[in-house]
Amino acid sequence: MKTKGPKIPDSISETLRSSAWFGSRDRNGFMHRSWMKNQGTPQRMFDGRPVIGICNTWSELTPCNAHFRQIAEAVKRGVLEAGGFPVEFPVMSLGETLLRPTAMLFRNLVSMDVEESIRANPIDGVVLLCGCDKTTPALIMGAASCDIPTIVVSGGPMLNGKFRGKDIGSGTNLFSMSEDVRAGRMSVDDFVGAEACMSRSAGHCMTMGTASTMASIVEALGLSLPHNAAIPAVDARRYELAQNSGREIVGMVHKGMRISDVVDRRSMQNAVKVNAAIGGSTNAVIHMLAIAGRMEIPLSLDDFDAWSREVPLLVDLMPSGQFLMEDFYYAGGLPALMREMGGLLDGDAKTVNGRTVGENIADAECWDRKVIRSLDNPVRAAAGIAVLRGNLAPNGAIIKPSAASGKLLQHRGKAVVFDSLEDLRARIDDPDLDVDEDSVLVMRNVGLKGFPGMPEVGNMPLPTKLLEKGVRDMVRISDARMSGTAYGTVILHVSPEAAMGGMLALVRDGDMIELDVEGRRLVLDVDDGVLAERSAELPEPPRHSGGGYEQLFMNHVLQPEKGADFDFLVGRRGAKVSQNAH
Ligand code: FES
């Protein structure tokens, strides 16, 4: 008996990548469709509708992203509503709080996972589900290298932490309370009691840490729908945004609107300025440089300094201020902030919904001037990331003045040097350590190759003996990064790093170091001849010979001013698959 197969059009839209998998009636078409049908997929899903990948970083080991299955369901509803075919796929997740030695070691690995997963599969457009710090840049980097229609849905911040009648913020109050314990101002029992009060709902850190910063940058770049940055994870409107994003990505595929059609140098400039106005994380610098590198958009450290120099701090959020992301959303969120920034931004930059930035924010209103300040009443007049140079950092170093002590922004002090994180931990509380409040704490070999992975340890703990005397901040310098939730007069990303022969490796105890943030200078005040002698005594740069992924990292990671990407990953490779074994 002759069995009639389902009706498959002779040809479906050739503009869809997925048609190369699902569009034929031959053996390959059978294979591609048949196995997908084991999930109960009806034939009509293969009739030429856009296949939308939902790239999910859900993991119970990434608590900030643990609610992503529900978000993926909302995205699927939107994709189906708009006539697309949603397919969810996992990639490695990066939980900032658990991963050892540091999540940053794996950002590029995840970006490779994302890139290859998109390219190798019948995906016409992709929705990136991002939350915890590194998941956002990693997913965007991977998608950018493929350059297909892309939209980001962030998981949203946790609700405000609440502890004994006060709001407490992720990370920021962890750091302040642990210093209180060390200084004898808080008991260990009270400290442990605050744990559940800080993280009391689904979502990522609710301070303006790296996760909230990157979610804001995504929105400022035009890569998400408005309000993506601040809607709390548990607010029903987060799910509405996810469903709407599912609808939108189908439209983007129909319009052939790739990620490179949305993001350009104007968008980068807007995002850098927004990062300044929100008091965003220093990690944004490294991640944006990497994303720009993947998209082949020129962006340098100096752009950060130049573009953010005149931008005031307008959002009063921890760690630079007092409020939290939940308050930011209720005050109007990023659209209200961007509208307040007005002429500082390029309103003609594009966004994923087909409207310009200017059109998206035209009607945004601010509902709470304590949280989102006006341009004529900023939290601070100048707030952006400052890029420092000098013999100590010829390729640059950065500082976030909004999170620093004003009186230390111009400072000269004696170096107290730690050769590693272990050395710091072993000696920082030594009563005999020769240190006072004017000293400059220096830590080295905590960079990309020195650690490896450039951990968030740049905000070194202060010596207990100084904490007990009431000292709250000191100038600290390292080749490490710092948590976006941290604060202090902390100079980071010193380049070249010590392990690559950078000047940081030549500093000795007692050397004078001069910091001048206004003048953008970081100088080791030691005679050139002496430095040349010390340089000749330096050991060879470290070589990891243990194999595995870490070997790849050591061989190919670029320095922080180039975004810490792998040299062979920079650029847009597109989504074309050159060969096919089927
Ligand atoms: Fe995940 Fe802070 S630990 S966002």
Image (spheres, helix red, strand yellow):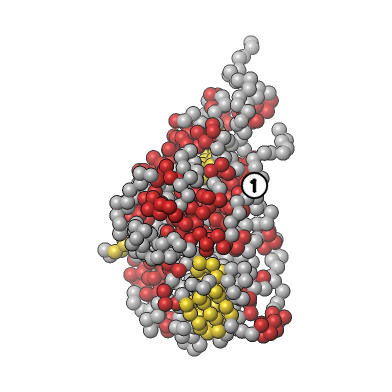
Residue 378 vs residue 464, the one in the foreground: 378
Residue 33 vs residue 404, the one in the foreground: 404
Q: Residues within 10 Å of mark 1 (few under 14, many from 20)?
A: some
Above or below for 577 versus 307 = above
Instruction: Return the residue at label 1.
Output: 572
Please state the horizontal and vertical placement of residue 38, each as a whole percent of the image. Answer: 56, 30
354 sits left or right of 258 in the view: left
493 sits left or right of 436 in the view: right
Ligand 1 within 8 Å of the CB at mark 1: no
User: What residue lies at 39% left-to-right and 40% top-to-bottom?
Assistant: 240
Q: The C terminus lies in which quarter of the figure? A: top right
- In terms of image quadrants, where is residue 181? bottom left
User: Three-letter amino acid code at disc 1?
Assistant: Arg
User: Can you see residue 485?
Assistant: no
113 sits left or right of 466 in the view: right
Above or below for 164 versus 353 = below
